[in-house]
Image: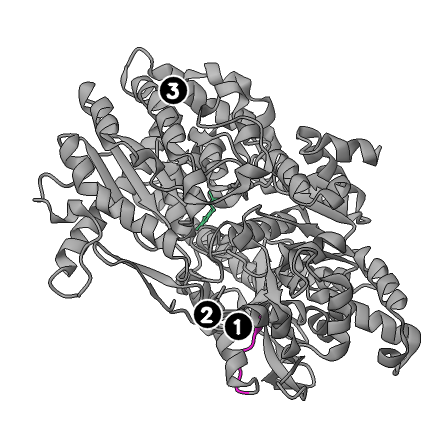
């Protein structure tokens, strides 16, 4: 029997309501599954089972887990926020249970910036911990919580960079929890770290413990990051001041204090939380002070309460050898400013006489016995030292010849789920060749066929246009905002284009767009390609090839030469615009952070890196571009030596000869501005020609796709994590171990290590 139209529609309506009811009770259930509690607090995003099992591993007597110690961790939620993504997928916006609803609103609408990083080192730490979570490697991270962040950057056209305290509220940030003291749950969980005043009297610095959960995309594993917050009234004012900003370097003492707040906090945190991690990974030497407490504890166990007076120097040294077996150290830079050396006198106020005795035995600088060299100490006391690219390994071996044998390379990577743009991710999702790419970035390894797949090439270009439009719209909106703000603030708009008439100013998304963004520091030579403006403008006007140059980056507030570089870039804008008849538009975007980085790497048509070789130990922003299929144009330094593949993936320029200790200098006279810019001017027209000439454009896209097939499988943190796991020597579940081996088979940063492994 045929049903009448009205009956028919009623059945549909009933059906829909019924499905909705089932769906909502199911999603209700899903939300309860996302709530978990233990003696330290209540957490949102993982199930009770996941919380318990991760915690159980990290506190198990076997000690088969790792503590990852880093001065900074960059993991902003506006670039990767799996819990929020899941809620959006489930389309849940409110919940009747108020305790759940609060979390729900916080995760859907709460702040997304966690300004606990300054640049590449912190972003790498965040990316690394995310991959450990994805791959289910039991790791806990530890860092400080800086209530004034690093700094917020304003830029004035004449003054240049202006640094402000970052405003953020840890209390209101999703996924960040102040832990409770299990003994008295209304109180925060705290640790204390001993310090000494000028008279040698002991006092304590107190930190409350925060936990940031780095939850993986499947929500079935997480890495806890413990953040030490010394800004409690229990700590003396000067300690609170020293902990306020990341890399506060207003005095030697403050710098050294900040390092101690991290290093000396590690064992108290482990004891308070019951963490048993046998292996400790130092992400750069900042936290190397942990060695002092490890040695002291070992001696105390062995020689009892009076160890301080009873042990010989030999006992201390053998304890140090014992402790070193637990440590894995990654060195990140050959640049002096990145290495910690402090005057001995500073330590008279920071540690007790016994710790100074340890330091005198282990940390004295060989060239200058009035300073402690902490980089050298970290290099001496570990079971594995890693540099962050193959070239950086050679450089590090030359800088520390006495440890050359134990230095190996693990080339950095980036977290692919964080850095692949939404438009690119959607593209990857739709191609069967790339099935499962979210879980397994190695799927890109066998996809050469994509080069010949016209559908893929077309969709790739479409996704790219979407991303370029997002970037260019952002810049244009910023230019207008700055112009309007002119009347209401004392900041002079940083960009010349803000001052032009509306119709002249806006950037176009069809214009070739070159991106450059990173910390501004002398050796990174942000203004290199502007060394000869006439020549640069000429190649643009001769062929009528318009170019957008989009720049961003912060200089450390006490790095004057770094800030000069920002002023140089601003000062060039007008001249470049006029000399190129308005074809070249150079824009500086203030406030570089992860979100801007993601927008820039995906929206640019090429990514520029112009450091002085070999001072860029790795560099990671170029990898972020590569994972979006954006070619790099770079000095042969850091990762690019490995990612260049004979030009299949981009362009190289500049000095690439032998590296000797003379090349380590950052003196202005040895920065090779003339030679390297000259070399850039020979490749740049070739790039523009491939981009603009319709008969050659296919060759440009070839390079893009080659980035996906050749670089995606290598320069991701899953592969990097797998190489670290081999150094950690962990006993892992066979399934996890198998995945790690699969990633390691894709690439081996250091064949000499692999042969040692057998
Ligand atoms: C990736 C990233 C960096 C590091 O860039 P490099 O090219 O390695 O210097 C610095 N800052 C932010 C915000 C980043 O996202």
Q: Position of residue 359 (x, y in %)?
A: 73, 67
Mark 2, Cα crowd under 10 Å, few <14 / some 14-19 / many 20+, is few
Left or right, residue 303 beside residue 640: right
449 over 227 or under it: above or below? above
Residue 732 is at least partly visible in this image: no
Q: Which residue is mark 2?
A: 250
Return the disc, 3 or 2, that comes first in the chain's sequence. Answer: 2
542 over 732 or under it: above or below? above
Q: Nearer the viewer, mark 3 or mark 2?
A: 2
Between 215 and 302, which is closer to the camera in this rendering? 302
Q: Are marks 2 and 1 in contact (CB under 8 Å)?
A: yes
Q: Is residue 28 magenta?
A: no
Disc number at residue 39?
Answer: none
Instruction: Tell me which residue sits at (51%, 81%) in the image.
Output: 238
Magenta: main secondary structure equals loop
Between 285 and 657, which is closer to the camera in this rendering? 657
Q: Position of residue 98 (x, y in %)?
A: 48, 75
Q: Which residue is mark 3?
A: 700
Return the disc, 3 or 1, that comes first in the chain's sequence. Answer: 1
| Circle 2 SS class | loop
Instruction: Tell me which residue sits at (25%, 43%) in the image.
Output: 587
Q: Which residues are magenta?
A: 228-233
Label 3 and label 2: CA atoms lie apart by 48 Å
Q: Are marks 3 and 1 in contact (CB under 8 Å)?
A: no
Left or right, residue 377 beside residue 711: right
Between 299 and 425, which is closer to the camera in this rendering? 299
Residue 706 is at least partly visible in this image: yes
Quarter holding residue 699? top left
Label 3 and label 1: CA atoms lie apart by 50 Å
Q: Which residue is mark 1?
A: 254
Q: Does the Cβ of the disc 3 residue fall within 8 Å of ligand 1?
A: no
Quarter holding residue 659? top right
């Amino acid at each position: 029997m045929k049903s009448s139209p009205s009956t028919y529609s009623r059945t549909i309506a009933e059906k829909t309501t019924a499905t909705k009811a089932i769906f909502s009770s199911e999603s209700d259930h899903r939300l309860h599954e996302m709530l978990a509690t233990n003696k330290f607090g209540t957490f949102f995003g993982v199930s009770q089972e996941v919380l318990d099992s991760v915690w159980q591993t990290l506190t198990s007597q076997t000690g088969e887990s790792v503590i990852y110690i880093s001065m900074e961790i960059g993991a902003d939620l506006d670039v990767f926020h799996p819990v929020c993504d899941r809620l959006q997928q489930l389309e849940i916006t409110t919940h009747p249970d108020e305790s759940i609803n609060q979390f729900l609103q916080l995760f859907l609408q709460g702040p997304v910036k966690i300004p606990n990083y300054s640049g590449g080192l912190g972003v790498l730490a965040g990316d690394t911990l995310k991959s450990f979570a994805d791959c289910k490697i039991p790791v806990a991270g530890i860092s400080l919580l800086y209530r004034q962040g690093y700094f917020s950057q304003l830029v004035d056209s004449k003054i240049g960079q202006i640094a402000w305290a970052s405003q953020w509220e840890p209390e209101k940030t999703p996924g960040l929890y102040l832990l409770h003291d299990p003994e008295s749950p209304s109180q925060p969980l705290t640790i204390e770290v001993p310090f000494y005043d000028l008279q040698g009297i002991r006092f304590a610095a107190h930190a409350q413990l925060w936990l940031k959960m780095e939850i993986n995309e499947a929500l079935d594993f997480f890495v806890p990051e413990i953040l030490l917050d010394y800004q409690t009234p229990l700590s003396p004012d000067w300690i609170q001041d020293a902990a306020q900003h990341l890399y506060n370097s207003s005095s030697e003492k403050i710098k050294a204090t900040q390092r101690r707040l991290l290093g000396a906090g590690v064992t108290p945190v482990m004891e308070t939380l019951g963490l048993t991690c046998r292996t400790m990974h130092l992400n750069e030497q900042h936290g190397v002070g942990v060695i002092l407490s490890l040695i002291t504890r070992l001696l105390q166990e062995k020689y009892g309460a009076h160890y301080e007076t009873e042990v010989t120097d030999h006992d201390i040294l053998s304890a140090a050898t014992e402790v070193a077996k637990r440590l894995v150290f990654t060195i990140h830079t050959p640049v002096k400013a990145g290495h910690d050396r402090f005057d001995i006198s500073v330590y008279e106020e920071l540690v007790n006489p016994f710790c100074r005795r340890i330091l005198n035995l282990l940390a004295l600088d060989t060239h200058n016995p009035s300073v402690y060299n902490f980089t050298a100490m970290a290099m001496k006391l570990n079971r594995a030292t890693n540099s962050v690219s193959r070239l950086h390994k050679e450089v590090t071996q030359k800088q520390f010849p006495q440890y050359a044998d134990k230095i190996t390379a693990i080339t950095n990577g980036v977290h692919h789920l964080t850095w692949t743009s939404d438009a690119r991710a959607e593209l990857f999702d739709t191609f069967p060749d790339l099935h499962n790419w979210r879980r397994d970035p190695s799927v890109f390894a066998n996809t050469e066929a994509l080069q010949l797949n016209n559908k893929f090439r077309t969709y790739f270009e479409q996704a790219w246009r979407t991303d370029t439009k997002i970037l260019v719209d952002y810049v244009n909106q910023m230019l207008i905002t700055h112009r309007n703000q002119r009347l209401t603030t004392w900041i002079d708009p940083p960009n010349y284009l803000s001052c032009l008439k509306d119709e002249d100013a806006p950037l176009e998304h069809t214009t070739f767009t070159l991106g450059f963004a990173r910390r501004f520091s002398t050796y990174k030579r942000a203004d290199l390609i502007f060394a000869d403006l006439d020549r640069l403008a000429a190649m643009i006007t001769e062929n009528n090839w318009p170019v957008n140059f989009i720049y961003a980056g912060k200089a450390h507030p006490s790095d004057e030469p770094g800030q000069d570089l920002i002023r140089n870039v601003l000062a060039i804008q007008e001249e470049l615009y006029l000399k190129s008849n308005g074809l070249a538009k150079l824009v500086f975007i203030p406030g570089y952070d992860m979100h801007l980085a993601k927008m820039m790497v995906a929206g640019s048509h090429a990514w520029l890196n112009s450091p002085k070789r070999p001072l860029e130990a790795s560099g990671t922003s170029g990898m972020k571009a590569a994972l979006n299929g954006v070619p790099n144009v770079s000095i042969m330094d850091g990762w690019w030596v490995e990612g260049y593949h004979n030009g299949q993936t981009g362009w190289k320029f500049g000095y690439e000869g032998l590296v000797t200790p003379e090349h380590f200098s950052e003196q202005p006279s040895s920065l090779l501005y003339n030679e390297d810019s000259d070399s850039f001017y020979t490749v740049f027209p070739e790039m523009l020609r491939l981009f603009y000439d319709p008969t050659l454009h296919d060759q440009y896209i070839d390079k893009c796709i080659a980035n996906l097939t050749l670089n995606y499988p290598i320069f991701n943190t899953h592969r990097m994590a797998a190489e670290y796991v081999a150094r950690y020597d962990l006993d892992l579940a066979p399934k996890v171990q198998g995945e790690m081996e699969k990633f390691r088979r894709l690439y081996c940063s250091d064949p000499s290590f692999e042969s040692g492994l057998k």
